Image (spheres, helix red, strand yellow):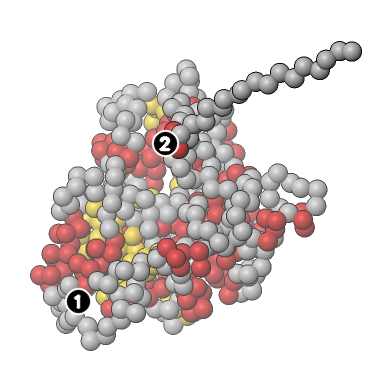
Amino acid sequence: MKQLIVLCFSLTLVLPTSASSQQDETYDYWRFNRDIIRRGQQAMFMCNGLFTSNRTLEQVFAQELAFLQSPIGAPDGGDYVVDRHRKTVAVGSPEHVPTMRAAFREGLGCVIMAPDQTFEALGGLPILHMAPPPGNPAEIAWPDGDLTEDEPFPAGVDAAALQAASDWAFQRESPEQVTLSLVIVKGGDIIHERYAPGVNVTTRTRTWSTAKSIAVTLIGMLVDRRRLALDQPLGFDFLPKVSSPESDPRSDITLRHVLNMSSGLYPVDNAGLEYATGSGLSYWAGASSVEGMRNRGLVREPGTRWDYENYDALLAVYAMKLALGDRQTYLEFPRRALLDRIGMRNTLVSVDRFGDFIFSSQVYTNARDLARFGLLYLHGGTWNGERLLSQEWIDFVRTPAPSTIERGNFYGGQWWLVPDGRTDVPKSAYSTAGNRGQYVIVVPTHDLVIVRRGLDYGRQGFNRWDLTREVLKAIRTETSDNH
């Protein structure tokens, strides 16, 4: 009889300590995407700087491209080609990274092309032919036009304190904060206007995420008309498509969720990936914004977690597109519904190469147009006695997103709010915010709109609520609202 021999082994498993439990990855697996995006950014910054903003190459390299820190070439030349006749820019030689190309398109600003496209495809890019509104803005009184008159300084405003606030904005201790323009409007009148050298009243620059606040205004107009609804699902399929769309948990995401930046979808613009994948590919590399924003899985219950995502904003814009019905109506809608009606003649809303608005960032405008935009909100959605936007919608964008309640109530519906704990500015103030220091600040208690445009770079850090505090030192009012 055979004996059963059981051998016992002692196995020791060495587990990592808590201090080293995180697996470190030192290689940047997105480096090739980043290289494409970096070239695409330079092509777009140069194209828009030259042909949308009408700035010089020297100005573009000194300020627009400072954001890149190590741009290709210099004002006197380099590995780029500017075609002033066609209004195009190509950046880089196609050795290890594709040449990236951008082209100015009438009515829209510059469009980034795909890495495998050449300028032979120029004729297929979107374009918007629309005549300007009637009249010469230089002969039309502010705010519908740009004609202003010298008037006595308004009572209740301390001129010296106002100048001190302006100096505070322009004379920054940090060289990384570059204020281009400051416009302060009280009682509907411009009481202070200042521009940096090389910038004037007509200079357009990129709004970055201030565009989101313009987009939510247009979306609100459609909600007011009952063509969209805040608490109904967005109404389109996500990617990848599932066999039964009604069983897709993403179908429960509503317009409110995405406008509150709490869709619950996988966040692609966080953790250092904004300029590697996600919306960066549609902003700077010619990818479809519509395909990318829908191709995300649900990782949280909608409405429960705040994640600042460009694609969330673009989901709302896509819902707007579907509600409008056809391509031409969609392209004309920003001007017909808003821009032309309040005198924003200098504003261009740009698109990707497929004709979809990059309304989370890609808008070019000047300081006065943004002041007009702020006035629309200050006046409760009316312009020259005509209601363009409901008070209910303004109340929505100013109401803290539920997902921010435990984090300071700092964000509403594509507008930023005075955070909890800030007691030196009125709680009723609210603001747009865009990268590199683009702010439109509305202060209802003081009948005030403040616009600051910048080309900040590096760490940035210009604080809009500090600016508001400094300006309010010059404004005397009997009204007080810190609640």
- Name which residue type carries label 1: Ile
**297 or 453, which lies in front?**
297
Identified at 14% across, 59% down, the residue is 167
Between 60 and 162, the one nearer to me in the picture: 162
Q: Which residue is mark 1?
A: 475
Helix, strand or loop under label 2: helix
Q: Which residue is mark 2?
A: 19
- Asked which secondary structure carries label 1, the reply is loop
| CA distance separating discs 1 and 2 | 54 Å
**Disc 2 residue type (three-letter):** Ala
Q: Quadrant of residue 453?
A: bottom left
The C terminus appears in which quarter of the rendering?
bottom left
Query: Can you tell which quarter of the image residue 3 is in?
Result: top right
From the top left corner, tell me how far across and down residue 415 is, in percent: 43, 64
Q: Residue furthest right?
A: 1
The answer to whether residue 411 is visible is: no
